[in-house]
Image (cartoon, rainbow, N blue to C red):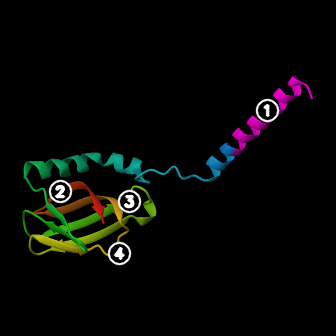
Amino acid sequence: MNWGSKIVIGLAAFMLFIIGVSIYMVSHDSDTLIDNDYYENSLSYDQVYDSKQNLINDNAKPNILLGKDTLTITFVTTNNQGKLIFKRPSDGGLDREIPFATADTQFKLPITTFVKGNWSLDISWENSKKSYLHSQSLYIQ
């Protein structure tokens, strides 16, 4: 076998490798976004901005305390109602949305069922007909 046929065999093997990798990448679509409906969320970004601005203007940032088996959120005011959105950056299938309502300033959530690791917590709530939004990263051990 001469050097010309070795080059052709090498190029053919390289092309088959590239085609195989391309087919694998297309068929195993693991390239996911954090939000599946990011376009719809971007259309309502003014509301998100206003909620974040209300948090700053009213100095209403909640205090988040992560215990061994309980997440305690202490709000500035009483009678809060909203939802907690837990997002797992490494696996979107573990994301959770939990509604809550408080009569006092504290809300406690047991976290023993959560997978250990990094989480992103978005707290969206209303108080006195004002909406608030706070985002924070958590590491559950």
> Which range of residues does the magenta coloring cover?
1-20
Q: Residue 10 carries which label?
A: 1
Indicate the position of residue 109 as horizontal and vertical percent values: 23, 74
Indicate the position of residue 85 as horizontal and vertical percent values: 30, 63
- Crowd band around label 1 with a 10 angstrom C-alpha radius: few (<14), some (14–19), many (20+): few
Task: Report, in whole angstroms, how far the alpha carbon at label 1 lies from the one at label 3.
Answer: 43 Å
Q: Residue at x 22, y 46 (%)?
A: 49
Q: On the picture, is 81 further left or further right than 97?
A: left
- Crowd band around label 2 with a 10 angstrom C-alpha radius: few (<14), some (14–19), many (20+): many
The amino acid on which the numbered mark 1 sits, given as a three-letter code, is Gly
Which residue lies under the disc numbered 4?
113
Q: Which mark is residue 132?
A: 2
Q: In which quarter of the image is residue 3?
A: top right
Foreground disc of the pair 1, 2: 1
Foreground disc of the pair 3, 2: 3
Q: Residue at x 34, y 46 (%)?
A: 43
Foreground disc of the pair 4, 1: 1
Which quadrant: the N terminus?
top right
Which quadrant: the C terminus?
bottom left
Circle 4/circle 3 CB separation < 8 Å: no
The amino acid on which the numbered mark 3 sits, given as a three-letter code, is Arg
Q: Quadrant of residue 78?
A: bottom left
* Of callouts 3 and 2, the N-terminal one: 3
Q: Residue 100 carries which label?
A: none
Circle 1/circle 2 CB separation < 8 Å: no
Circle 4/circle 2 CB separation < 8 Å: no
Most common SS among magenta residues = helix
* Of callouts 4 and 3, the N-terminal one: 3
Which residue lies under the disc numbered 3?
88
93 over 10 or under it: above or below: below
